[in-house]
Image (tube, grey):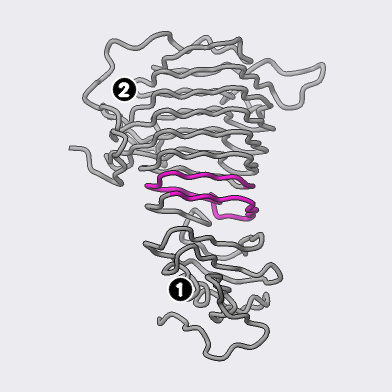
Amino acid sequence: MREAKPPSALTPSAPAACSNVFDVRAFGASGNGSSADDTRGFRAAWKEACSAESATLLLPSDGVFTVTSTVFTGPCKPGLTFQGPNGSTLPGPCDSPALIRFFVSNNVSVQGLRIENSPQFHLKFDNCNQVRVDGDDCISIGAGCSAVHIENVTCGHGHGISIGSLGVRNTRACVSNVTVRSTRIVDSDNGLRIKTWQGGAGSVSAVDFAGVRMENVKNCIVIDQYYCLGAACANQTSAVRVAGITYRDIRGTYSQQPHGGGGPIRFACSDTVACTDITLTDVELRPAGGGSGEAPLARPYCWNAYGAVATLTVPPVYCLQEGRPESLQDQLDTCSVAEHPMGTPVS
């Protein structure tokens, strides 16, 4: 299919691109809320904006645009801004779990964005560097990402903020220097989660969660090095190392599970590659509902997890081991600062 070209003569309802501002209506998008597909107009406007320095791809705020699954490719000139109204997705088939995905991108800033009805994740970042997110989003951080800052985010009815899954099919994954600030997670299956497959390599390091509020979240704090989508995942000796994870000022409520299953804090680390340098400070998670008949606190779960509890926590985390394990496998070393491969097989 050929990409749409800008019309040679534009009507008043389709303003032309000028001064490095590229209005999608000038490239054939209607924005009238009908069943018309505006994807070609978006792609044509992107192509022109991508080739111009400090350009703005504009979605007029008075339009309702229909865009199907598509890829906006680069490399682009510096300073490209995608500016548009709030958006949502319509019911229908979808071949991607993420509404918006950034792949191999640098110096990305997402702000003032409200998204609803995403397939699974609002935003997903893979192999990205220098990312800042500020808005009403739920986020998945993939392999190869570093220097990610997430702030003022609200997540509801989903999977919260996830790092991973990493290390699938024995690949090497590197994620580092992630900060999450002033975030609210409501009525979700997960809150703050790091998940890795067995058999991978690489590391997740220098992650700081601070100032997070949770309401009725099933699994509030999770490190899961046994992530598996089925029941046939065999135990393996290699794993993506998880180290240097800090939880500060994490407060709220967790949903109670039938028959006492689950719990608000779960550190399920590899048998052979322990999680290390986990720090908990000012963590208070209580059963949802409260009142005089408040249910007993669910017990946190730890397996081969090492770190420190800097202040008293609710519930108490007695299972976190102090220091570092003597048997820690050093052959699965942490990733270098410049290393951000995607899908590198483990030898």
Which residue has dot 1 on it?
A: 48
SS at badge 1:
helix
**Disc 1 crowd, CA 10 A, few/some/many (<14, 14-19, 20+):** some
Q: Quadrant of residue 310?
A: top right
Q: Disc 2 vs disc 1: which is toward the camera?
A: 1
Farthest residue, direction front: 19
- Against 98, residue 305 (above or below) is above
SS at badge 2:
loop
Farthest residue, direction left: 347
Q: Residue at x 76, y 26 (%)?
A: 289
Left or right, 236 with reference to 298: left
Stretch in magenta: 107-136
- Against 73, residue 317 (above or below) is above
Cα distance between the residues tagged 2 and 1:
48 Å
Give me the disc on residue 273: 2
| Rendered location of residue 35, percent (x, y) | 62, 78
Left or right, 47 with reference to 30: left
Q: Quadrant of residue 332?
A: top left
What type is the residue that disc 1 sits on?
A: Glu
Asked if residue 124 lies in the magenta stretch, the reply is yes
| Rendered location of residue 296, percent (x, y) | 68, 15
What type is the residue that disc 2 sits on?
A: Val
Left or right, 94 with reference to 298: left
Quadrant housing the N terminus: bottom left
Quadrant housing the C terminus: top left
- What count of labels does the image hold? 2
**Disc 2 crowd, CA 10 A, few/some/many (<14, 14-19, 20+):** many
Q: Residue at x 53, y 80 (%)?
A: 27
Q: Earlier in the sequence, mark 2 or mark 1?
A: 1
